[in-house]
Image: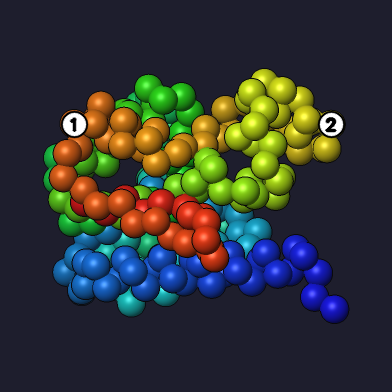
Amino acid sequence: MISLPKIAQKFSNYNRRRKYDLFCKTFSPNAHTKILDLGASEKEFQENANMLEKRYTYPENITVLGVDNYHEFHGRYPKVKTVTYRGGDTHFPFGDKEFDICWSNAVLEHVGSKNTQRIFLKEIQRVSNAFFITTPNRYFPIEVHTRTLLLHFILPKTIFDKYLSLLGKKWATGKYMNLLSLKDIKRLLHESGITQYKIVKNKLFFFTLDFIIIF
C-alpha cells in the first residue's frame, strides 16, 4: 500500500515537471538564452529538486543566485555558475537586464517580509527581461511545506508557529515562510511597479495549488 507521504511526493514531482514544461513552452529558451535561477537548493531532499538544472539542455547558460555555498550542488551540476549572497533586502549582484529570463520556483514565500518580497520582485524585473515565478497558494487546503490541513490560513501566524513547534516542525516557523494569496500577489506586483504580467492558477482537482507569475 502506498503511503500518504509517497503519494504527496509523486504529485510534487509531477507538479514540478508540469511547471518546467510550461516554462519551456512559454519562453522557448535556446543555446543563447541566459537564465537566472533564484534559490536553487544545495541539498536535494526531493527527487525533482532543482528541476531546471536537472532538465535544461544548456546548463552552462544558467546562473544560480542563493544564500547557500553550493559545494554539493557543484558536484551534481558542474556546468552551472553559482553566486552566493546574503539574501534579505540586499540587491542582486548583477547589472540591469543581464539575463534573458529569471526562473524562481517556490522562493518568493521564503524571502521574508512583504517589504523584502517587494525588493525581491523589483530586483527580478531589474536584472531580467522576462520571468517565471511560482509560489504556493495560501488558501490551498494543505500547507505544502508542513502538510498541515487548513490551520495555516485559519490561525494567526504566531499561533500557527506555536502549533508547528509542538509538532516538531519549528524549522517552518518565523521568517521561513510568508504565504501569499492571489490578492497578496497582485498587490505586491503593483507595489513593485510590475504592471504587465500573467498569473496562471496551477490546479489540483478544484483547488488552486500554486500560482505562476509570467512576465
- Left or right position of 202 against 138: left
Read off the residue under disc 1: 193
| 58 with respect to 168 (left or right) | left
Is residue 182 in view? Answer: yes
Q: Position of residue 141 (x, y in %)?
A: 62, 48
**Camera-side residue: 76 or 207?**
207
**Observer able to see residue 93:** no
Secondary structure under badge 2?
Answer: helix
**Which residue lies under the disc numbered 2?**
166
Q: Where's residue 130, x and y in %?
A: 20, 53
Specify the quadrant of the image occupied by residue 91: top left
The image shows residue 198 at horizontal and vertical percentages of 24, 52
Residue drawn at point x = 82 percent, y = 37 percent: 168
User: Quick one: label 2 or label 1, which is nearer the N terminus?
Assistant: 2
Q: Position of residue 102 (x, y in %)?
A: 28, 52
Identify which residue, 23 or 82, lies in the foreground.
Answer: 23
Q: Residue 139: which quarter of the image?
A: top right
Quarter of the image for residue 34 reads: bottom left
Residue drawn at the location 41% of the way across and 65% of the way down: 19
Q: Determine whether 160 is above or below 207 in the image.
A: above
Q: CA distance from mark 2 to mark 1?
A: 40 Å
Pick the residue in front: 165 or 212.
Answer: 212
The amino acid type found where label 1 is placed reads Gly
Q: Is residue 62 above or below residue 3?
A: above
